[in-house]
Image (cartoon, rainbow, N blue to C red):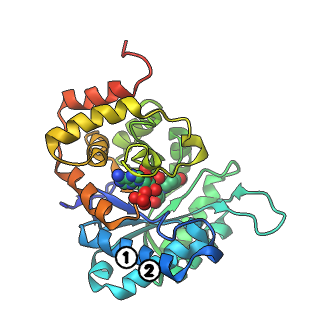
Amino acid sequence: MNPIRIGKTTLKISPLAYGCWRIAGGWEARKVTAKAREAGVKALLAAQEAGYTLFDLADIYCEGVSEELMGLALKQSKALKKSAVIATKCGIRVPESNEPFRYDLSADYIVQSCEKSLQRIGINCIDIYQLHRPDWLMDPAEVAKAFAKLKKAGKVKHFGVSNFNPSQVSCLQSALKEPLVVNQIEASLMHLDPFENGTLDQCLERGITPMAWSPLAGGFLGNGKKSVLPSQEKYKPAKVRRRLDLMARDFGVSRGAVALAWLMRHPAGIIPIVGSTQPERIRELAAATELQLSHEQWYALLTSALKEDLP
Ligand SMILES: NC(=O)c1ccc[n+]([C@@H]2O[C@H](COP(=O)([O-])OP(=O)(O)OC[C@H]3O[C@@H](n4cnc5c(N)ncnc54)[C@H](OP(=O)(O)O)[C@@H]3O)[C@@H](O)[C@H]2O)c1
């Protein structure tokens, strides 16, 4: 895969990211078997071999196990250690006892979370540290304090956000010394909001790289079992899948590869985050980087996804 730059930085990454949410096979650390750990590491190594260099993690993915597996894979593969650009996230607090489920972007929590992620991954510095979701009580000055501390200590190279709307990005950015480099958002032919709500416009305007999570709508746009979040259950993919299949046949690639190429055609430079745990699919989806959809093909897919005709 030909490397591209992330945000306005000099950091080079693959145009597809590999997402590590599912690599341990579930949400709960205590349920992860040795076999599941082995499969997780295998998926990471397959991604490296297929040319992915950007790896997306979060502290909450399987309660830290995804980060640990990344650490194991880095120890096993010199090639991965050399090429991997590590992105991880903090800010979602899963209750430990009677506390509520919550978001927490207070300075102390960001700094502590980052230190724990570094330990689990076994590295000294995170390339891109993202705030997972906007905290309803977010104080930009607090976040700026945490970012400055982490940057000064050499623990983070660049910062980004996830699931932030444009005004939340602007508000936070106004307190920061450095530009936010990514906004990670749900985007796919089943979830078009960022194309219309100003998110991608803001990315273009500010040079922020949009990263698309669930680019295959959790499997709805794949051809195997789907594994979706509750908010994705409502998706109705039949028409889009038919249109994708026609194009996939013409291009000689999979349906999923066309769905990723559709995202990548947008001028904001969307990086789809591939979430499959199966080496064969991880390899096969890399074909998306070779496809260039025409304006006409792009609209043919868009219109198959819209509930109503364009006015
Ligand atoms: N920032 C956030 O809030 C947020 C939220 C969600 C996700 N993410 C990130 O985005 C990444 C991707 O999300 P996602 O896993 O929902 O992405 P996705 O690519 O939309 O969905 C992947 C799921 O689809 C299944 N699938 C079925 N058929 C497939 C096919 N032909 N090709 C590929 N996959 C197929 C996969 O199963 P198999 O494993 O069996 O292939 C897997 O369960 C995550 O790993 C995480 O890094 C971020």
Q: Secondary structure at mark 2?
A: helix
For this view, does 192 lie left or right of residue 266? right
Query: Mark 2 — residue?
Result: 38
Residue 287, percent from left and from top = 21, 54
**Of 216 and 77, the residue lying toward us:** 216
Q: Please, which residue is most extreme toward the front here?
A: 224
Residue at figure coordinates x 45%, y 81% from the top left: 71
For this view, does 282 lie left or right of residue 175? left
Is residue 178 among the parts visible in the rendering?
Answer: no
Marks 1/2: CA–CA distance: 6 Å
Check disc 2: other Cα within 10 Å, few if <14, some if 14-19, many if 20+.
some
Residue 145, percent from left and from top = 60, 65
**Of 105 and 298, the residue lying toward us:** 298
Residue 209, placed above or below residue 72: above
Residue at figure coordinates x 68%, y 59% from the top left: 104
**Of 194 and 198, the residue lying toward us:** 194
Which quadrant of the frame does ligand 1 lie within?
bottom left
Image quadrant holding the N terminus, namely bottom left
Residue 188, percent from left and from top = 40, 41
For this view, does 42 lie left or right of residue 25? left
Q: Are marks 1 and 2 in contact (CB under 8 Å)?
A: yes
Q: Amino acid at mark 1?
A: Lys
